[in-house]
Amino acid sequence: MRFEILGPTSVLDEDGAPVALGGPRVRALLTLLALHAGRVVGADQLVDGLYGPHPPDGVANALQSQVSRLRRALGRDLVEFHPAGYRLVADPQDVDARRFELLAAAGRRALADGDAGRAAALLGEALELWRGAPLADAPHAGSAAAGMEELRLAATEDRIQADLDLGRHRDLVAELRRLTAAHPLRERLRAQLMRALYGSGRQAEALAVYGEARRLLDHELGVEPGAELAAAHLAVLRADPALGEAAGTTAPAKAVGATGGQPGLKQGLRAQLTSFVGRAEELAQVGARLRGSRLVTLIGPGGAGKTRLAQEAAGQEPGDVCFVPLAPVADAAGLPGAVLVALDIRDALLHAPQRPALDPVTRLGTVLAERDLLLVLDNCEHLVGAAADLADTLLASCPGLRVLATSREALGITGESILPVSPLRLPPPEPDDPLAYAAVRLFADRAAAVRPGFAVEAGNAAQVVRICRALDGLPLAIELAAARLRTLSVADVAARLDDRFRLLTRGSRTALPRHQTLHAVVAWSWDLLDDGEQRLARRLSVFVGGATPRAAERVCGLPEEVLFSLAEKSLVEHVGGRYRMLDTIREFCAERLAESGETTAVRDAHTSYYLDLVLTADPLLRTGDQLDWLARLDAESDDLDAAVRWATESGQLETGLLLLAHSSCYWWMRGHRGTSANLAAGLLARTGGACPPGMEEEYVMCVLVSAWTGVADEELRERLAEVRELLPVTHLPERVEFLMMMRSMFTGPPGDVEEIYHQLLEHIDGLPPWQRALSYSGAGFVLQILGRVEESVASFRRSLATFREIGERWGAVLVLSGLGSLASEQGDYAAAYALSDEALTVARELGVRAEMAEALCRRAEALLGMGEPLGARADYEEAAELARRVGSMDMLAWAHLGLAEVALAEGERDVALSLLAQARAECPDDWYSTEDIRKRIDATRDRAVSGR
């Protein structure tokens, strides 16, 4: 089938006949799915696109109804359900919008390659796919439609550019008049109209277009024309032949940087032996910067591909270019001479007494004074001061000169345009299409060169992705890794990356020595640092996820200005307020830290910093500031784990217990079950099962965290049994407040529930706000067990009011779920649905996936009670996926139990029994909080077996 959404939505079958779709909602749903053909579209995104900001009540059921109608129209197999949403099973190229994007991109590449004829054909074919306003049947998808319109206009501009390059100036004037009237602030269209008019012999009108545009931009925006429009104006004034010959003119003036229409002179640029992969956008950016600035500097870490990008950009320049490699130049005194040699300017053999020799800088200024030239200064970092002085002097005295520099830090000259060159784009750990990412394409290209027939496919994609991610997307490192395929398999290379500096040692023999091994690449940058910068760089390697300036200053013992200097020299990158090292640089610096003998002291300082952080953050996670502190700890999560590991490895058991106990609330809210349980198990093993004196609360929390995965061996069961002995049920936490929640979840109340209720009432009023709110909730659960429903509801309501008073959303989710459970028990499924839906909304705002899964399970129970099994199944499936992601085994077991109940309700007995067996295997045996789930699993299995 073919899907058309660039206009009114329609579907054509294999014979080209239209397929009847039905009403507007179905057409809107198809439009949204077709826009992302082959990919899962989230239910929330579909609801927004179908109903806008005010969806109806029961919108989940309404969405499922529309999906059912669409399946009837297209066939059930073409619209797949996934836990995260729905997917249109179609090749993206069968959708006109996607085909348009592909054709437009191919046309743009052809235009960049100088093939104007092919570009015009491809872009014309792309634009012919449009039949009207895009996404016309999805009125709430305005932003997506606006994006498509922008792509259409850009493709139109590209097609016009191709037609101009083909000399079709007169044919374009009328079209460009219409387009500039419709888009008066679009400068590219104005520049193209100027070119079309000039090429039609209408130079005065072309200049008038510029004057009108300049007035409009000044009046509307208060800005001057941009570089492209200003360049078009200057070109018309100069009768630049690059515009195309104006009708009635003869002998046009020589183009800047060209001689007699011939390509400019390229000095020092070598023909490349390998393809240029993954830098099309950066290449275009360099070209644009060079058109707007006379000094452009490409900065980035070693191995990022700055030199190759500069070579490619210089090769596309129409005028004269001189490429000057500075890596072999040892000192500042040799820099001007290296430029003279690259320009092929030799010293005179003899100097007459009356004509003394000029110094090299003066000679360069004299030679370049009236020349139009792009001078490329490659690898300036070890001569950055001298390079800055030379560039500044020459640019001031040579008006036709432009400079493109590459360096690991900027030259620091007024007017410099700095363009960071980042590593290649990396795929996520499990990408749908690895070759959509430049880093993988580069590896595949270089691997095929050393191992003919190599291709990235299902059998090796995971290892290739791992290699590219481990090497930070650095092109040089990826090329070195691909070269090892001459003697190693992809799996072998991936397995040996833990020792990357020994592995990646066989680069090109003709490359510079510092580009032949990965170690040499990083060592070159290291050697350019001063003592203070080297101290900070090696100490900063203890941070796993990067550091804020405050954290780096405290842990590393050096002022933040040194950190900023490392960022300027591309040793660290600044991302989202944090300074982080690429893993390759971090590993190198960690080796230097070990050599310095500072590892223990710096890692102790790192651990101390994170202990102070969690001691501050933990109580604030249960206040109105919890969103801010959750976000802050999200950024610090990897380093928090590293601090616990170091405390365990170094035998700082009390510090480790403090770190772990005060991280537990964060870990639980964020669903970090598996990682935190492993950390706790490792710490418990170091304690030898003995609780340090005075740390009973921290030790008990460590035992409980170790049980979070739901898998307990005999030793852990014994420790769980000891929890009540260490801390009696009447114990109120003094240091680890969250223990109040965790202990009851795992151990439950003792046999006399009534006694527990009265004990709660005795202490509740004197408790801090969060513990008081939690106690009201606990009383509600106890009263529910005792069958005192009205009192239970009242207690839950007091808990909810207290949580809301202190701004604690997580506790509110807990109570809303309890109220929903109570309503469901009473058969009030509408109230249960509303309460669970409210809990889900708050949980999503908070980003707590395990609680989202619980709310979905409770909402699904309500839907099943209301006789809506389809909606219940969708909620249970989403809950299972969320629980699986965070390793919440209790929620996963509940979701599979619910799916079994749905299957049983629909007569699918075998499916139900299979799901029940899966749920029982997943359900933790040692948690009090899962007792109800275990009982329900057994009861449902009995019903399924008996056929009742």
Image (spheres, helix red, strand yellow):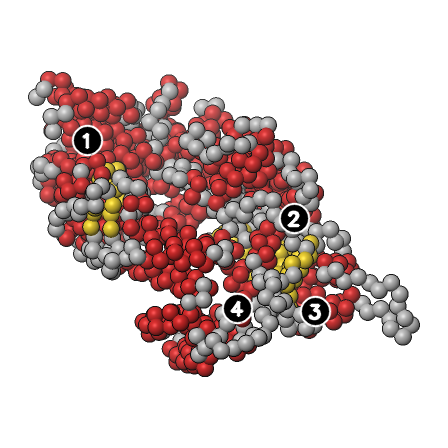
User: Which residue is identified by label 3?
Assistant: 368
- Residue beneath the point at 78% across and 65% down: 360
In the rendering, at what x and y percent does residue 621 appear?
36, 47
Instruction: Please name the amino acid that badge 4 sits on.
Output: Ala
Q: Where does residue 690 sit, x and y in percent of width and height?
A: 46, 25
Residue 525: assigned label = 2
Q: CA distance from mark 1 to mark 4?
A: 71 Å
Circle 2 or circle 1, nearest the eye = 2
| Crowd rating for badge 3 (residues with CA inside 10 Å; few <14, some 14–19, many 20+) | some
Mark 1, residue position: 898
Q: Closer to the N terminus: mark 1 or mark 4?
A: 4
Whichever of callouts 3 and 1 sits on the residue coming sooner in the sequence is 3
Query: Callout 1, which amino acid?
Result: Gly
The amino acid sitting under disc 3 is Leu
**Element marked by disc 4:** helix
Query: Of 598 and 864, which appears nearest the observer?
Result: 864
Q: Which badge, 3 or 4, is on the more N-terminal residue?
A: 4
The residue under the point 47% across, 28% down is 682
User: Which of the 4 image quadrants contains residue 41?
Assistant: top left
Foreground mark, 4 or 2, reads 4
Specify which label sits upstream in the sequence, 2 or 1: 2
- Disc 2 to disc 3, C-alpha distance: 32 Å
- Residue 337 horizontal side relative to residue 751, left or right: right
Residue 417 seen in render: no
Callout 4 crowding tier (Cα within 10 Å): few <14, some 14–19, many ≥20: some
Q: Secondary structure at mark 2?
A: helix
Q: Quadrant of the N terminus?
A: top left
Distance between the alpha carbons at the discs numbered 3 and 1: 79 Å
Front: mark 2 or 3 = 3
